[in-house]
Amino acid sequence: MPSLRKDRWIITAVSSVVVCLFVAGLCQTALAQAAQPNYKVDPFWPKELPNNWIVGQIGGMAVDRDNHIWVLQRPRSDTPDEIGADPSSPRAAMCCVPAPPVLEFDTDGNLLKSWGGPGNGYDWPDSEHGIYVQRDGTVWIGGNGPTSRQLLKFTNDGKFLAQIGHPSKGPANSADTTELGQPAGLEVDEGAHELYVTDGYLNKRVIVFDTITLAFKRMWGAYGNVPNDADPGPYKADAQHDQQFRSPVHCAHISNDGLVYVCDRANDRIQVFTKQGKFVKEFFVHATTREPGTVCDIAFSRDTGQEYLLVADNTDNVIWTLRRSDGAVLGTTGHDGRNAGQFHAIHQLVSDSAGNLYTGEVETGKRIQKFVLARGK
């Protein structure tokens, strides 16, 4: 009998430990799920534009130090029916006319400022793509049109300051450090005075310039290799990983811990580098998706450790939530569609200091939306 009691006691104790561990595991899972960012669309953002304006495709978005949202849109992507009130349209309708390329909004959706377009002393891109606003208000603009080989630098109110490169119809040349190749994304390392450019739709590299002197600093391709413009052929998910970026190299963003996260869109992957271009690791995002690809833009969660990556996917038309440490997919936001909170060709993704997200769409989407952080980091 004593032996039987002892056995029962051991079984009870072991069972209790197992239950405790199971419950603890459930609690940890629940806490992890609760910590993940969760978003709710604000259907009233932004407010109606003045002057009978309408926006076209959204080529770039940025958030400045005052949490103002900057939008670089493409007036030339407007169709005649969309700009029926414009003299160029045969419709002579009541609405609308193209808005200026550069628009600045506050978090409530009020338009604060607008400017941009061709002018004297600089070469405005033939298709707007990529915008970044420095802490001092300096605005950088790029373009991915057929002749876009340049970057432009402006003051906060649109006064031209400087230009890197010049328009050209030349072929891809990722070895040329004086011209760009249809650049896509821009990011500034303020402390180092360095401009990171994902270059881009024609070239296949990350290239870095000095923001003050405009001097070339360094560049690299996928895995930190010397950039190569050779055509890799059709994308295949089960093939050996491409040793170079595919077109377009779409974004580069710097994390708080000094790593550079690069959008290799058509390869369905994020590659992570040191600021000097040394390869660290890579994550694949729904790698069975074919071109144009899944990794269009990235935003970091706003907790100190930036635990999560938010990834805009313009083929599946969702925002993926990834764990930044290992790239594990934790969930999605949005769905393909025309309603508020849905996407058609989500192309740009930025976050304000409160963790709210702002998105921009191309193709026929042509809209910007705000997603309020409802829960998590």
Image (cartoon, grey):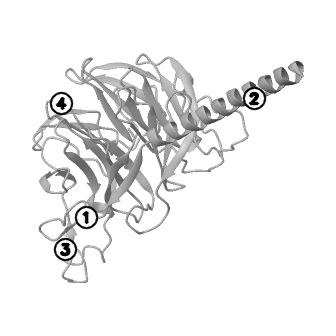
Alpha carbon separation for disc pair 1 and 4 = 28 Å
Q: Is residue 280 left or right of residue 217?
A: right
Labels 1 & 3 near each other (Cβ < 8 A): no
Of callouts 4 and 3, the N-terminal one: 3
Q: Residue at x 23, y 60 (%)?
A: 46
* Crowd tier of the residue under label 2, counting other residues whose Cα lies within 10 Å: few below 14, some 14–19, many 20 or above: few
Dot 2 falls on a residue whose secondary structure is helix
Which is more foreground, mark 2 or mark 3? 2
Among the 4 quarters of the image, the one containing residue 350: top left
Residue 344 picture location, percent across and down: 45, 62
Q: Which residue is mark 2?
A: 12
Q: Amino acid at mark 1?
A: Phe
Q: Nearer the viewer, residue 124 or 266?
A: 266
Q: Amino acid at mark 2?
A: Thr
Q: Which residue is mark 4?
A: 135
* Crowd tier of the residue under label 3, counting other residues whose Cα lies within 10 Å: few below 14, some 14–19, many 20 or above: many
Alpha carbon separation for disc pair 4 and 3 = 36 Å
Q: Which residue is mark 1?
A: 44
Of callouts 2 and 1, the N-terminal one: 2
Q: Residue at x 45, y 37 (%)?
A: 309
Alpha carbon separation for disc pair 4 and 2 = 62 Å
Q: Amino acid at mark 3?
A: Asp
Which is more foreground, mark 1 or mark 3? 1
Q: Residue at x 24, y 23 (%)?
A: 190
Dot 1 falls on a residue whose secondary structure is loop
Which is more foreground, mark 4 or mark 3? 4
Q: Which mark is residue 206?
A: none
Dot 3 falls on a residue whose secondary structure is loop
Q: Is residue 144 visible?
A: no
